[in-house]
């Protein structure tokens, strides 16, 4: 933690990972019905500052045992996930394209369910008032970016919205993903951030 309150997960060094978790597990199941995950919303501001901007950076997620550096975002890869049976919900902000993980490009936002292969991903962008037109921007520009993650228990719908910091929240989310999170999350789960650097390094704040 810096004196100004900014949390740096990892500095610009190669082959390292960093985690930051809320110290206690958070309740995710509804107080009215323990079989469903309650509606929740969160927002945060982050920046990815590559040491070599033209090359990019590995990115980070929003863990657990068996985490690896390099392209794995500090999360368990397929092998470790099977070994430790780690369940997680990850929102990914990635500045590298890894074909082994079926990444769509080198600048994307995704949602992953207990896997580093995203269930859904979209190029980083935000919508103005017109849903037919979005504006692309770079996750690895070093500039602050705001993200919103919202889950609606009635619709069983998870939304992820991003935009450059300082803008109002876009009306339309970048990703809308139908999912019943009661199949993924336990009554209590840890929440936090994870990041890693491979040979391409960046500071993750």
Image: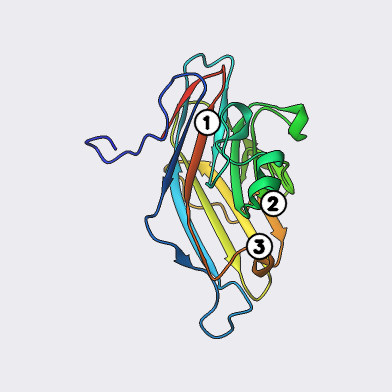
Give the crowd class for mark 1: few <14, some 14-19, many >=20 residues within 10 Å: many
Could you tell me which residue is drawn at 61 percent across and 54 percent down? 89
Looking at the image, residue 126 sits to the left or right of residue 6; the answer is: right
Numbered label attached to residue 196: 1
Q: Identify which residue, 57 or 134, lies in the foreground.
A: 57
Numbered label attached to residue 13: none
Numbered label attached to residue 131: 2
Which comes sooner in the sequence, label 2 or label 1? 2
Instruction: Looking at this view, name the residue that lies furthest to the bottom.
Output: 32
Residue 100 location, x and y as percent? 77, 30
Quadrant of the image for the N terminus? Answer: top left
Residue 140 location, x and y as percent? 53, 27
Disc 3 designates what residue? 184
Could you tell me which residue is drawn at 69 percent across and 27 percent down? 97
Q: Identify which residue, 11 or 161, lies in the foreground.
A: 11
Residue 104: quarter of image:
top right
């Amino acid at each position: 933690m810096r004196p100004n309150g900014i949390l740096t997960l990892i500095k610009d060094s190669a082959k390292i990972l960093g985690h930051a978790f809320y110290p206690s597990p958070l309740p995710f199941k509804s107080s009215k019905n323990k079989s469903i995950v309650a509606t929740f919303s969160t927002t945060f501001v982050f920046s990815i500052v590559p040491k070599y901007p033209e090359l990019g950076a590995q990115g980070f997620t929003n863990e657990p045992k068996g985490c690896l550096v390099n392209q794995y975002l500090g999360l368990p890869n397929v092998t470790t996930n099977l070994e430790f049976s780690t369940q997680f919900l990850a929102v990914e902000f990635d500045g590298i394209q890894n074909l082994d993980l079926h990444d769509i490009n080198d600048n994307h936002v995704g949602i992953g369910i207990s896997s580093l292969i995203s269930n859904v991903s979209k190029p980083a962008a935000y919508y103005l008032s017109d849903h037919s037109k979005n504006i692309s921007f770079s996750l690895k520009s070093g500039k602050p970016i705001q993200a919103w993650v919202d889950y609606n228990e009635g619709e069983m719908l998870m939304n992820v919205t991003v935009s450059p910091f300082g803008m109002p929240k876009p009306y339309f989310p970048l990703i809308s993903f139908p999912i019943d999170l009661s199949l993924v999350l336990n009554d209590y789960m840890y929440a936090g951030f994870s990041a890693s650097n491979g040979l391409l390094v960046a500071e993750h704040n």
